[in-house]
Amino acid sequence: MSTVFFIKKGLDIRLLGDAEKIVVDLNPRLFAIKPTDFIGCFPKMLVKEGDVVKAGSPLFFDKYRDDIFFTSPVSGKVSGIRRGAKRKILEVVVESDGKNESLDFGAADPAKTDRETIMKKLLKSGLWPVIRQRPYSVTASPKEEPKAIFVPAFDSSPLAADFDLVVHGHGEEFQTGLDILARLTKGRVYLNVHAKKTMSKVFLNAKNVEINRFKGPHPSGNVSVHLNRLSPLNKGEVIWYVYPQDILAIGRLFLSGKHDTTRLIALTGSEIKHPQYYKTRTGASINEMVKDNVQKGELRYISGNVLTGDKIDKSGFVGFYHTQVTVIPEGNYYELFGWALPGFGKFSMSHTFPSFLYPDKKYRLDTNMHGGERAYVMTGMFEKVFPFDIYPLQLIKAILVEDIDLMENLGIYEIDAEDFALCEVIDTSKTEIQRIVRNGLELMRKEMS
Amino acid sequence: MKALRKFLDKQKPHFQQGGRFEKLESTFEAFETFLFVPNTVTHSGAHIRDAIDMKRTMIFVIIGVIPTLLFGMWNVGYQHFLSYGQHTGIWTNFIFGLGKVLPIIIVSYAVGLGIEFLFAQIRHHEVNEGYLVTGILIPLIVPPDIPLWELAIAVAFAVIFGKEVFGGTGMNVFNPALTARAFLFFAYPGNMSGEKVWIADKLDSFSGATPLGKALVGNFHNFPSVHDMFFGFIPGSIGETSTFLIIIGGLFLLITGVASWRIMLSVFAGGYVMGLIFNLWGANQYMHLPAWEHLIMGGFAFGAVFMATDPVTSAQTTKGKYYYGFLIGMLAILIRVFNPAYPEGMMLAILLMNVFAPLIDHIIIQSNIKKRLKRARVALIE
């Protein structure tokens, strides 16, 4: 087998509330597709409230790339289009009729189908947006061909869903999905597994791909890390990446012709009474999952993980790319001399709290900032959790002053906001690093288009 | 605690926009966050945050200097009574020293924090914690007899021209504490060097020369023992004398990860290597001084542990820290041995390298950029 890439820099934040490997079928009443999940997408609606839809029926398309459709995950009727400030569309809600009927896009054998037909099918069925690209982490452009496609087969973020379980028993769909991906690039499809934790034969016996093994703390599962070690991205190059649960949906589309985004969602976090997996579809409402299943108190509901997820409310919807919902306590409290007390039980990567003496402890962490925003003073901290040959603080500062050339020179194409999540967590100055990096990426994208 | 919180919540609106004392918002915020870690929650990016903040970091540096501060107070008294030939008890020495040092600390904090608060207020910024450390470092690097008014002017100069004109904490080029010392050194040299100033209210006939002062004029007779120099029973700036306690404080900073071990280690390495070079050269008696002895004399250890490691004014890249530290160590010994006017080179070495730190970083970052461009070119050819 190929070499193991050992990621040394990083940090595993141990939290309470890991999902037990129990899978419960769930058919929530409401589903939603959130245009805000697709960076840079400007939605043009194709349906209005009350319209009847099937799984795979288009809901909206991207004004600037009008061949990219976003489709309904279930059959039923459009029950609401929720808008925010300046009438920005936030959620397109579909009320499920419980039948899960799908439009028929026609089954096809990947080996006998040409690239153009595959692309058309993916675009029309609404599965295209599961393919994202680097740089910029936006929905892939159908007009480009990537130099490679990356599939991360494990998630190293806190309380993440176990991808082994996600693909368990779906070997055929997964392999079909990989075969499809292989048709989309002249380069390789990299399937990146965890050197120890990945046990599933579905991953380890996958064909038509190059399997590479990684180990080490988070962010060892991030696409950027795999990219950095296997095929560093240079200016002008593009790679695509897709997550396993979405590859299953692609596989099903080509095996059965149906739009079926059935997936597992891990319900996790210290405030969940029974953390476990739910089998549902893209965009499911979390209402039924968390009802009578959470502890008392003011809570933060997160679609995704605690590092990069989105804040949603308790009847909100799981994001398009998320396989996990996390619920943690809000941290809306004052703490007398909190900065001066020894702070047993507090989590810190720094050795200024005793937490470094018991590294295996699992924490119930809340959303308190633990301090106010300050100028950048400390140096050399980010480098400890940032496994790239990139100077993180210097790149952040280049973004803040909007120096395009310097951002490019310092390697902004190779990274995503999520790679800075740990920097943000441990930042003594309490700045919003992921937002800064996202802004930088958006600036570059506009500048380059 | 609840009553205090209630009181603050009641007063807060007066200090916010539209309130009676809105001009004092930063001041209120500074005191409030001193008492309570604020209740703000994450609203973008990561939902959880590390418990560390700037206050925590700064308080750990202060804890690190406390051993040298306490010893410095004792030593001020010890040296004073020694000049009269008296041997007194620990407490007598300490209380004499406290009487000398406490006013210096008070002036340092009052003037420095006063200016910091004023600037924060004008800029509508939060008050940064950086001065909490600077304010305790300044008393440790001045002689015990420093006139308080001179100190006040030096602190004001350091905070305004060393820090605020660059944009405040995090933006300054020079180490603020050393800027204050350099100001005193050049503005009032009579009170900052020579044989008179290092022992508080000493007997006139008693020589108060520091080991460095003696070494510079080639006076190696009745040189203090290595034991005295290492443990700090010698005259000097208040906090610089005890290498032993500085190392203890340094270890605390290293274990807690507050200061950079790379800088500390490379400063000592640089000093040692320069000492060895002089040993080989050996043109005069000073050059023959064992290289390691340089490291326990004067302000070398204090500078290496508490001054060179200031994250804002030192090199910021990992590799850069090695060069930065090593050059400080070398320059400090070079200035010591060669410059006839300045017995101690540490202050000037650090300030000089403060200027060069951005250049060091620039060179290192450029090499990273070149590597990336080269990779892109290779990919293009393939």
Image (cartoon, rainbow, N blue to C red):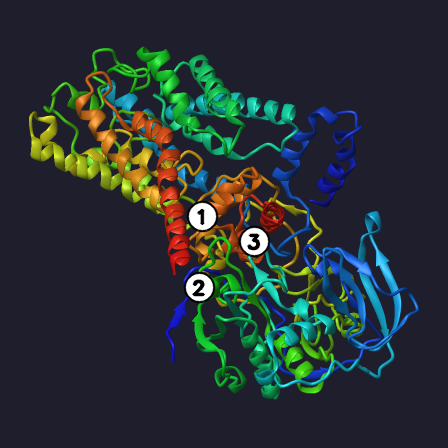
Q: Which mark is residue A425?
A: 3
* Amino acid type shown at disc 3: Val
Q: Is residue B290 visible?
A: no
Would you name the residue on which mark 1 appears? A391
Instruction: Write down the quadrant of residue B217 in the picture.
Output: top left
Query: Residue at the location (40% across, 14% down)?
Result: B147
Q: Is residue A220 visible?
A: yes
Q: Nearer the viewer, mark 2 or mark 3?
A: 2
Label 3 chain ID: A
* Amino acid type shown at disc 2: Ser
Would you name the residue on which mark 2 appears? A231
Q: Mark 1 vs mark 3: which is more N-terminal?
A: 1
Label 3 Cα crowd, 10 Å radius (few <14 / some 14-19 / many 20+): many
Gap between marks 1 and 3 measured at Cα: 17 Å
Label 2 chain ID: A
Instruction: Write down the quadrant of residue A276 in the picture.
Output: bottom right
Label 1 chain ID: A
Gap between marks 2 and 3 measured at Cα: 28 Å
Q: Secondary structure at mark 1?
A: loop
Q: Where residue A211 sits: x, y (%)? A: 45, 77
Callouts 2 and 3 on one subunit: yes
Q: Which mark is residue A127?
A: none
Gap between marks 2 and 1 measured at Cα: 19 Å
